[in-house]
Each structure stands twice: as C-alpha cells, then as structure tokens.
Amino acid sequence: MTYRIEKSRDSLIIKGLKDFKPSHIFECGQCFRWKREDDNSYTTIASGRVINIKEEDHDFIVKGTTLEDWNGFWHHYFDLDRDYSKIKKKLSKDPILDEAIRFGYGMRLLNQDPYETIISFIISANNQIPRIKSAVELISTDLGEFILNYNGKDYYSFPQPDKLASKSEEYIREKYRVGFRADRIREVSRRIAQGEFDHQCIFDFDHKNGKELLTTLPGVGPKVSDCILLFAYDKSEAFPVDVWVKRVMEYFYFKRNATKRELEESGEKLFGDLAGFAQQYLFYYAREMGIGK
DNA sequence: GTCCAGGCTTTCC
DNA sequence: GGAAAGCCTGGA
C-alpha cells in the first residue's frame, strides 16, 4: 500500500490512500469505540491513543498523532499493508459480493487489541450495538486511564485484565448493565490476568486451533470466537455467522432456511481464505439494507 | 457423539 | 412488546 503523508501544523494529511472510508470502517460493526462528530469526521481510541480522522476530497486529515506514531501504530491498526483492491476484485466475481462491495467499498478489517476484543464480543452476545458501545464505554470510564478530552468528550483507555478481574460479578452487572454476561467478563479477565489463559499465543496458531482455544473461555462460542479471530488475530478465514449473515446467506445463496452447520461451512466453501472479508461486506450490506428482515 | 429448546439481563426500536 | 454481531445447560 503506497500513500503519502504531509505534515501540517497540528495534523497529518494523508494522500493517495485507496480503499479507505472511515464511515465504512467504523460503522460496519467490527469496532465499538468511535464517535462520529458533527463535521462527519470520526474520533476513535485504540491502545490508549486517540485520533480524529476527517475525509476531505481525496485526502484524510488526521489529528492527534505524529508521523512516528502513525507509522508505528495506526498504519497496522488500519491494516494498510493489505491490498484491498485485490481482495475486492476476487470477491466481486460473485455477483452478490459485487453488490455488497459496491455498498461498503471503503471497509477495512482493523487489527484491534485482543483482550479488548475478547471482552467486547462477549458483551455482544444477544445484544445490540448501541448497548455494546455503552458497556465498553462504561467499563473504560470506570477502570481505564484518562487519555485526553477531544471536542468536549473525555477518552479513557480500555483497562488491563486485572482491573475487571478484581470486581465482583454483581458490580460488573450493575455498573456496566451487561446482565448475564457479567460473570463471563469477570472470569475471562481473571484467567488472562493470572496467566491461566495465554491469549498472545493465538497469533501463532492457525484459525482452527485458535478457535478451539478461544471457545474454552466462558461466553465465547463459535460466533464470538470467529469475531475475535477476525478482528484481533488476523485470521481472515474466520466467518462469524450471526443473525444478519444467516439472513443474507439464506436470502441470496441458499434461497431457503439453512442449518447452523451449512451456514458455518458456507464461508470457506464459497470464499476460502477470504471468508472473513466477505462476511464483513455481507454483514454491513445486510444490516444497512435490512435484508431478509 | 449431534441437535435443539428454553433461559438469560437490559435496552432499543 | 419483540428483538438484539449468542452462549450454556439439559434432554432427546
């Protein structure tokens, strides 16, 4: 991925960046920590860093970072080493994917922090995106570190595992409004904090072994583990099957009700090692268009 | 071993 | 009042 960065007084100006649209990247459901500002720019926090990014003509104005920090962190976070034009070209041979990609053409899969992603997607079970965002926000404000105020809003990092592990189930449930997910959050945080669960080694595992290990965690089933593998561990074969993917697959591909197994196997069969990208284009398209609802 | 119904907290539409 | 980026348990 080749692009140019120009420095201005208080921001970076990124030029020549292809396949990149903040609204598609943040609003496609992979990430819960972003805010759309009144000027349609996006402010996001990741690994204790806060940036604001604004699309302007074909450039992107980024506030809150330096050249070193962009190259050392955000470049990888936004997955800028990957050629999405190539991925989209391959997937577009499928007419349904072609349509989904026309809709969400600027989507990219973020490389997010593993622990934050694990907890966020445990919270996502049988839940709605506004509520998931709210819970992650409440946890960070309560236990994370204050980073800075941007445009009137305080930003806090997501806490380390020992912080959540030290709270009671009742405290987590009542303070963050996470219901039956409270004990799962506490227990998973405890296992990671005490070194019982090594989440770093999953980077070296393949998709199948990573899924096997992650699903040993309470609150992590097949769908949630595939989200974690796709959004934090760079496993692009992962194909999370949720209600929207079920709807879009049954509506366009099966043209009938499909079993859970048929749905889970369809990703690899149809899209191979690009299944994760296909899933994300399809999810975003199906949810925004209300397919099959 | 696989499959499936019912229950789960709370909020959003 | 039903549905929500599902998981867990128990029983067939």
Image (cartoon, coloured by chain):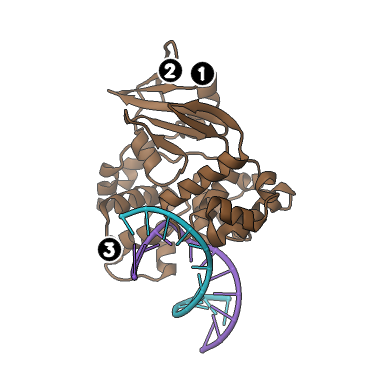
Chain colours: A brown, B cyan, C purple
**In which quarter of the view is residue A215 placed?**
bottom right
In the rendering, at what x and y percent does residue C3 appear? 35, 64
Q: Given the image, what chain letter belongs to the residue carrying mark 2?
A: A
Q: Which amino acid does label 1 sit on?
A: Thr
> What residue sits 51% from the left and 42% below the top?
A137
Mark on residue A66?
A: 1
A14 up-or-down from A163: above or below:
above
A284 up-or-down from A72: above or below:
below
- Mark 3: secondary structure: helix
Q: Given the image, what chain letter belongs to the residue carrying mark 1?
A: A
Q: Which of C5 and A175 is in front in this view?
A: A175
> What residue sits 45% from the left and 31% below the top?
A80
Q: Name the residue under label 2.
A: A12
In the rendering, at what x and y percent does residue A176 appear? 55, 51
Q: Would residue A134 appear left or right of A115 to someone viewing this image?
A: left
Q: Which amino acid does label 3 sit on?
A: Tyr
**In which quarter of the view is residue A152 placed?**
top left
Q: Mark 3 points at which residue?
A: A251
